[in-house]
Image (cartoon, rainbow, N blue to C red):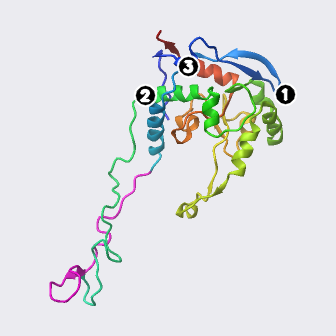
Amino acid sequence: MRCFLMEVILATKDPHLMGQKLVVNVFNVNGDVIEEIELPSIFYYTIRRDLINRAFLSAFTAMLQPKGRDPFAGKRTTAKYWGVGYGLARVPRLPNGTARFVTSTRKGHIAFPPRPDRNIYEEVNEKERVMAILSALAATSRIELVKKRGHIFTCEKLPVIVTGDVENTIFKAKEAKAFLEKIGVWSDIERSYKKIRIRAGKGKMRGRKYIEPNSVLFILSKYSVPFAKAVRNFPGVDIATPRNLSILHLAPGGVPGRLTVISLPALEELRDKYKVEFIE
């Protein structure tokens, strides 16, 4: 995915936040609150569900591989139309009377088969995609939207901010679990584990047998930090960096408000990457 950076994004502030400040807690390695900080201006952005949904469809359909049928599939047959007077349906038939070729017969061709040259992905403007990411980022700070998505947590303020030491201090999954319990997001990972189920339909035969609900999104400075390796196998967890942050991470299914944990270095990088000025 291309990294797109705009100098300044002019926007209107969310009317629900007029006169309010978004202040969140910062947790250290021990899970204790060490300070309170105000979130960057990107978290005051208006929630645009239309942009989020369109950007999600664009990113999701871009992963689809075009497929098509052989143009002569179902048509390679010697069947011919016999004509009238046989008391049979007027369809092409083999010499033994078996119907072929038409769509209503066995081994017949498909009526409107998929074509490899068909445009199956939705295009979205670059600025719209960036605005959708900003809107989805802002939605991670709205507790009502996060609860509406079905996430379970006990922390009072969102998103959850952790210090940079957490990235380089926690190495094991056992340590990560204890830390997530202290900051109040482990219950959402348990929710994802309990709701893992077998997919209905033929998809279970095609390498995607199980459905795993999304849980916590971790936005860290790098993929290679020890904390990322400690949490990457938890159910429903996704890991992203400010450079590769996508609408697929922030709004799975096009629904904003994902439960998110952000490290301070990643938050500073997001602040530098997206600069927003609000129009009064």
Q: Which residues are magenta?
A: 65-92
Residue 230 in sight in this render: no
Circle 1: is it few (<14), some (14-19), or many (20+) Cα within 10 Å?
few
166 part of magenta stretch: no
Above or below for 76 versus 115: below
Q: Is residue 202 above or below residue 215?
A: below
Q: Which residue is label 2 attached to?
A: 128
Residue type at tag 3 = His
Neighbor class of circle 2 (other Cα within 10 Å; few <14, some 14-19, many 20+) is some
Q: Is residue 67 magenta?
A: yes
Task: Mark 3: give few (<14), some (14-19) or many (20+) Cα within 10 Å.
Answer: few
- The answer, for residue 169, to whether it is visible in the render is yes
Q: As rendered, which of 154 and 271 lies closer to the eye?
A: 154
Q: Which mark is residue 30?
A: 1
* Mark earlier in primary sequence (1, 3): 3
SS under mark 1: loop
- Camera-side residue of 231 and 193: 193
Q: Is residue 212 left or right of residue 189?
A: left
Q: CA distance from mark 2 to mark 3?
A: 22 Å
Residue 22, horizontal then vertical, whole percent:
64, 17
Give the residue type that dot 2 points to.
Answer: Glu
Q: Amino acid at mark 1?
A: Asn
